[in-house]
Image: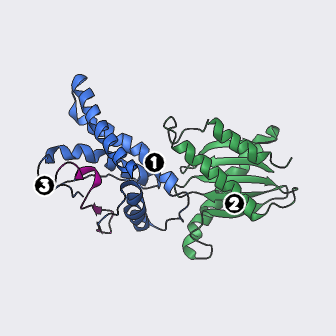
Amino acid sequence: MADETLFLLLHGEIVAGLYRAAEQGDGENGRCISKLENMGFRVGQGLIERFTKDTARFKDELDIMKFICKDFWTTVFKKQIDNLRTNHQGIYVLQDNKFRLLTQMSAGKQYLEHAPKYLAFTCGLIRGGLSNLGIKSIVTAEVSTMPACK
Amino acid sequence: MAVCIAVIAKENYPLYIRSIPTENELKFHYTVHTSLDVVDEKISAMGKALVDQRELYLGLLYPTEDYKVYGYVTNSKVKFVMVVDSSNTALRDNEIRSMFRKLHNSYTDIMCNPFYNPGDRIHSRAFDNTVTSMMMQVC
């Protein structure tokens, strides 16, 4: 449906717009990523509130992570996380082999250094959702080959 | 109907408290505060499989001679507490559930409001209207 592309384009514009403003303004590159992440954080909090309104109560952390991988990811990106791994001590790796926000960019190694900017918002999204569910977390993302990312 | 409605954040401070006979507010604040303990107890007892673990609605927390207290916890650990007058012909469970559902819907709308910082007191007029409509339904 059209609303998927809407979000993709809007997201691309947000990233581009922020960086343009940063170049004209203070020129600090690191701050843009945190701004993007904080935006995602606030959006994540609201989104989670809406999505968990009707679901049953979560029993534990693993339950919450599974919810994020399945329902949350499906609603936002229209697909599920391909792979979830954990070391049962608090570290979870979510792997998406065809990350929606990156598929339009490239299918290999080109533009690899620009990828983190596009992942910052989603990292914030996850962090905001988790914090609203009561989990303090740090979310990082890495890309080895587009469009897969962890 | 509902005599007092409170929304409590997950750190257990109130985001919103409103009671109808406004003279005796302190008494209701105190009641809501004590009911928080009961809420916590019910949540931690979920693992014992006595209560239905998957429900958000907690049901009657405890009755006193004047009124009854009902609770509801969202997945984001925000608690809604409702104090209802006992002298009213007992409200059916379903009505209480539907009132909590409406509260939850209004709360979700507030969360999505970009001008609202999670953790602040709730000043939204829409939320106020929802609460007023619930308090004044049968008068």
Q: Which residue is mark 3?
A: A108
Residue range in magenta is: A86-106
Question: Tag 3: residue type?
Answer: Gly
> Which one is closest to the eye, mark 2 or mark 3?
3
Q: Is residue B139 above or below residue A52?
A: above
Asked whether the residues under the numbered discs 1 and 2 touch, taking CB atoms below 8 Å apart as contact, a structural biologist would say no
Q: In the image, residue A87 lies at what x, y percent? A: 28, 68
Q: Label 1 vs label 2: CA separation?
A: 24 Å
Q: Chain of mark 3?
A: A
Residue density around tag 2, few if under 14, some if 14–19, many if 20 or more, within 10 Å? some
Quarter of the rendering containing residue B39: bottom right
Residue A45: mark: 1
Residue topped by disc 2: B97
Question: Looking at the image, which residue is at 35% across and 63% down?
Answer: A80
Picture residue at 75% right of the left edge, 44% below the top:
B133
- The colour chain A appears in is blue
Q: Colour of chain B?
A: green
Circle 1 crowding by C-alpha within 10 Å: few under 14, some 14–19, many from 20: many
Q: CA distance from mark 1 to mark 3?
A: 33 Å
Q: Which quadrant would residue B110 be assigned to in this image?
A: top right
